[in-house]
Amino acid sequence: MFNKNEFGENFKWGISTAAYQIEGAHNVDGKGASIWDTFSNQSKKIVGNHNGNQACDFYNRYVDDLQLIKSLNIPNFRFSISWSRILPNGTGVVNQKGVDFYNRLIDSALELGIDPWVTLYHWDLPQELENKGGWTNREVVNWFSDYVELCAKKFGDRVNHWMILNEPMVFTGAGYFLGVHAPGRKGLRNFIPAVHHATLCQSQGARILKSIHPNSQIGTTFSCSHLEPNTNSEKDRIATIKVDALINRLFIEPSLGLGYPTNDLKLLDRIYSYFQPNDEKLLPYDFDFIGLQNYTREIVTHSYFVPLLNAKLIKADKRKVPVTLMNWEVYPESIYQTLKKYDAYPQIKKIIITENGAAFHDTHFDGKIIDEPRTNYLKTHIREVLRAKQEGVKVEGYFVWTLLDNFEWAEGYYPRFGLVHNNFMTQERIIKQSGYWYKQFLE
Ligand code: FCB
C-alpha cells in the first residue's frame, strides 16, 4: 500500500459536490428557478421521475455536513454556487438571502479549517436566461460576466480557489445536442453556438475574477475519458481521433491558444460563423490550474450510422468488462493515461483531479455500509495518480466525487456515488466503509 505522504505536503486532497445535486430548497428564500428545476419537474425526463427539489437538503444541513467533512479529515471542499439563488432572474436584482447562504457556508467551512473551492457554473442556468435562448444566445457572455463579478465581489475575499465551468462538454452536449439533460434541446444548431459561448465564458469569467482578485487561483474543469480504438484498423483509428477532438480537446484547446480542433472535427466548422471580430483573442486564458474529471475509458469504433462523426462508443456492458452502476468500465489506468495526455500540453501549468469516483450498490450489514467495490475503486485510481506523479506529471490534487449520495442528473437518486450514504426519506447520513478508508488515508 501507498500512503498520502508519497504525494508530497502540498498535494490538495478534497471532496467535490454541486449545488443542484445536494442543496434542495429549490424555491425558498427568494431563489429563482434554474433549468434543472424546470427539467427535472417535467415528466419522464429523469429515471423514476425524480427531481432535485429536496435532494440532500444541504441548504439546511450544511453545518452538520461540514462537520462530517471535518470528521473525515478532508481539508478541501469543492461546491458550486447556484446562479439563480443569488440572481433569481439570472441578471439584475440580487437575492440577499442567497448571498447570505453562501457567506455562511464559506465562513463555516473556514472556521473548521476547510478550504472552500468554488465552481461558478455546475449546469444550473437560471430559467429566465434559458427563456431568452440560454447558452445559444451570445448575450450569455454578458450575463455570465455580471454573475462572476458579483461572486468575486461577495465571496472573493475568502475564497482562493475557483473553477469557472464544470464540464462544458457535458452541459452543451447532453443539454443542447442530445437533449437528455436540461434544458433538453437538440441538434447541432443549438450545440454549436452553445459551445462557442461557453468557451468565451470560460476565459472571460477567469479574466474578470483575476482582475478583481489577482492572487486567487483560477481553474476550470473538463470531463475527459481515455480513448482506445476498437481495432487497429484505419477506420477505427480515425474514429478515435474524431471522438477525442470532440470529447477531450474541444474546450481546453481554445483556452490554451490552440483554437478549436476543427481540423480533426469537420462537423464543427460552422462554429466560425458565430465568431465576432475579436473572438480569437478572447478565447485563450492562462489558467493557474486545469481540473480534470475522469471516471473511465471508452472504446471507439467506426460507424456509418452516426452522421458527420462516423464514430461511436462501444458500451461497457457489451465488452464484458467490470462496470459501475453507470455502466462505466472500471479501468484504473484510465486516470493515469488521462494525466499523461494532458501533461503533454506545455501550456498547462498545474493539474488537479477535480472529480473521480464510482456508483455501486451498497451492502447494508448490521447498520454499517460495506462498499468494498467503491473502496477498491478509490485505492486503485489514487495509486494510478501516484504513478503519474512519480513519473513527473504536474498533478497537484485529487478530489473524490462525492460526499453524499445525491441527485445524479438524468439518473435521479438511483446511482449512489457518496462516501456517505444518504437516506432520502429521513436525510440520515451514514459514513460508508469507503468514507472511513479515505478518512484513515488522510489522517
Ligand atoms: C460528472 C459531473 C458530476 C457528477 C459526476 C458523476 O460528470 O460533473 O456532477 O454527476 O459526473
Image: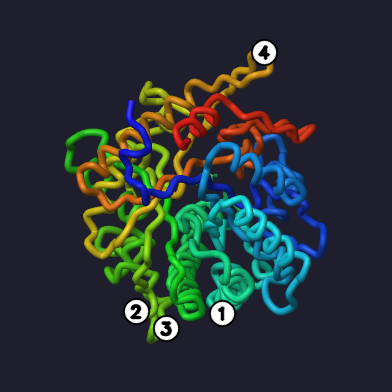
**Earlier-in-chain disc, 2 versus 4:** 2
Q: Up-down: is 192 above or below 317?
A: below
Residue in the image at 82% along x and 58% along y: 28
The residue to which callout 2 is attached is 280
Q: Residues within 10 Å of mark 4 (few under 14, many from 20)?
A: few
Question: Which of the two discs, 4 and 1, sits closer to the camera?
Answer: 4
Q: In the figure, is residue 391 to the left or right of 84?
A: left
Q: Nearer the viewer, residue 174 or 398?
A: 398
Percent x, y of residue 188? 47, 61
Say left or right for 177 vs 32.
left
Query: Between marks 3 and 4, how big is the CA–CA gap?
Result: 62 Å
Q: How many numbered discs sit on the rendered protein?
A: 4
Residue 72 is situated, as x and y percent measured from the top left of the image, at 56, 37
Q: CA distance from mark 4 to mark 1?
A: 54 Å
Under mark 4, the amino acid is: Asp
Name the residue located 29 percent from the left edge and 40 percent from the top edge.
Answer: 336
Foreground mark, 2 or 4, reads 4
Q: From mark 1 to mark 3, how far is it between C-alphas? A: 14 Å
**Disc assigned to residue 366:** 4
Who comes first in sequence, dot 4 or dot 1?
Answer: 1
The residue carrying mark 3 is 276
Q: Residues within 10 Å of mark 3 (few under 14, many from 20)?
A: few
Q: Secondary structure at mark 3?
A: loop
Q: Determine whether the residue tagged by mark 4 lies in a helix, strand or loop.
A: loop
What is the image's colouring? rainbow
Q: Earlier in the sequence, mark 2 or mark 1?
A: 1
Rendered image: mark on residue 142: 1
User: Which image quadrant is residue 299 in?
Assistant: top left
